[in-house]
Image: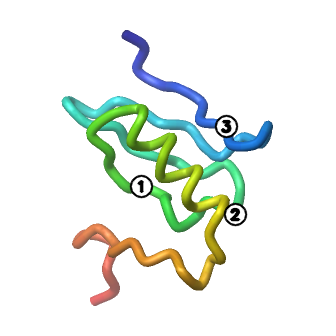
Amino acid sequence: MTDACVIEVRARTAGIVVREGDSYCFFAAHRDFHALERQSFDSLLAAQAAATRCAAADSSEIRIAPRPELRPA
């Protein structure tokens, strides 16, 4: 299995997903998918589904909690 995959939504590159142990970390390639930046997913399909939802949703509706180490002090 590869360590990185490109996620596309509607013929647009959403980001790159990199395997980290048993999960996949999302790195946004476009600002429309920034809400998913550095989020972990259990599978490539879960990352693809999140990117698809992100593209379909109004950015004000996206509610993904930041990772604890990324929260401001």
Disc 2 to disc 1, how far (Cα)?
13 Å
Q: Amino acid at mark 1?
A: Arg
Mark sitting on residue 66 = none
Q: Amino acid at mark 3?
A: Glu
Q: Earlier in the sequence, mark 1 or mark 3?
A: 3
Q: Give the residue pinned by disc 1.
A: 38
Mark sitting on residue 8 = 3
Residue placed most toward the observer, 58 or 2: 58
Q: Measured from the top left, where is residue 39 in percent x and y?
A: 38, 55
Q: Residue at x 20, y 31 (%)?
A: 22
Disc 3 to disc 2, how far (Cα)?
14 Å
- Please rate how many residues cluster around mark 3, counting C-alpha atoms within 10 Å: few if below 14, some from 14 to 19, many from 20: some
Could you say whether the residue bearing mark 2 is in a helix, strand or loop?
A: helix
Q: Which residue of the protein is positioned furthest toward the right in this rendering?
A: 11
Q: Amino acid at mark 2?
A: Arg
Q: Measured from the top left, where is residue 8 in percent x and y?
A: 67, 37
Q: Residue at x 54, y 81 (%)?
A: 61
Could you say whether the residue bearing mark 3 is in a helix, strand or loop?
A: strand
Q: To which quarter of the image does residue 13 belong? A: top right
Q: Quadrant of the C terminus?
A: bottom left
In this picture, is 28 found above or below 72? above
Mark sitting on residue 31 = 2
Q: To which quarter of the image does residue 42 belong? A: top left
Q: Which residue of the protein is positioned furthest toward the top in this rendering?
A: 1
